[in-house]
Image: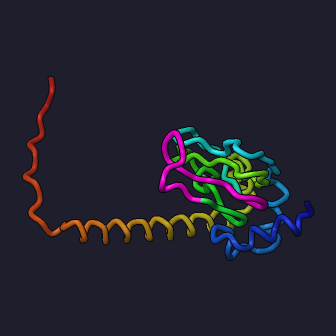
Amino acid sequence: MSIDNIIMPMLSVPFFEGLAISQLKSLAVGAERLVFNDGQVLIREGASGNAAYLVVDGKVLAYHGAAPGPDAKVHGVGTMLAEIAMVTETNHVVTVRALGKVRVLGFSRHMMHAYFAEDPGLAQHFLEVLTHRLKEISDVLRETDAMLGADAEPAAPTPNRRVA
């Protein structure tokens, strides 16, 4: 797969939007090319993550628990999996299995940190993307809190107790 063919799926991923072509090419060169066969686990719920994966061919199934349930979701080309793991330590919150043959690009945390040291603009870009995502999550939590009646009387505070 040529570098230009690798960059094409990256262009549709919000995490990479706004990066210069030269930055995308650098990331594409450093990305690990991986192939998973039908049923193979890419990511296991609860396991420590050290890389993000971009699906460049095929489909994956993401689910919680030991087996797929009604909340399982199918994702295809252009899906970024475990993106936070390429930036910081984290445990995966879902299991992801290959549905048929799947090709992904792996972006390891080690590789990304090396690129951040080399290109501070890249680090700034990802910081801004993550900050925006955290704000979106905060907004959703605030809306959920309001829907659940956050304006109800708060519980009485518990006195601090010292244990000798």
Looking at this view, is 75 or 26 the one in front? Answer: 75
Image location (x, y in percent) of residue 19: 72, 73
- Name the image quarter holding residue 49: top right
Residue 15 location (% of width, % of height): 64, 67
Asked if residue 88 lies left or right of residue 153, the reply is right
Asked whether residue 69 is drawn in magenta, I would say yes
Residue 122 on image: x %, y %: 69, 65
Task: State the quadrant of the N terminus.
Answer: bottom right
Q: Nearer the viewer, residue 56 or 122?
A: 56
Q: Name, please, the residue furthest toward the front.
A: 70
> Which residue is most to the right?
2
Q: Nearer the viewer, residue 128 or 78?
A: 78
Is 94 in front, or is 119?
94
Q: Looking at the image, which residue is at 70% across and 46% down?
A: 110
| Number of dots carrying numbers | 0
The residue positioned 61% from the left and 64% from the top of the image is 126
* Image: 156 above or below 162: below
Q: Position of residue 96 (x, y in %)?
A: 62, 48
Indicate left or right for 55 with 147 as reference. Answer: right
Residue at x 75%, y 51% (from the top left corner): 100
Which residues are drawn in magenta?
55-73
| Horizontal relation, residue 29 to residue 140: left or right | right
- Taking 98 as reference, is 69 left or right? left
User: Quarter of the image containing the C terminus?
Assistant: top left
Residue at 89 percent across and 64 percent down: it is 3
Where 9 falls versus 72 (above or below)?
A: below
Residue 42 sits in which quadrant? top right
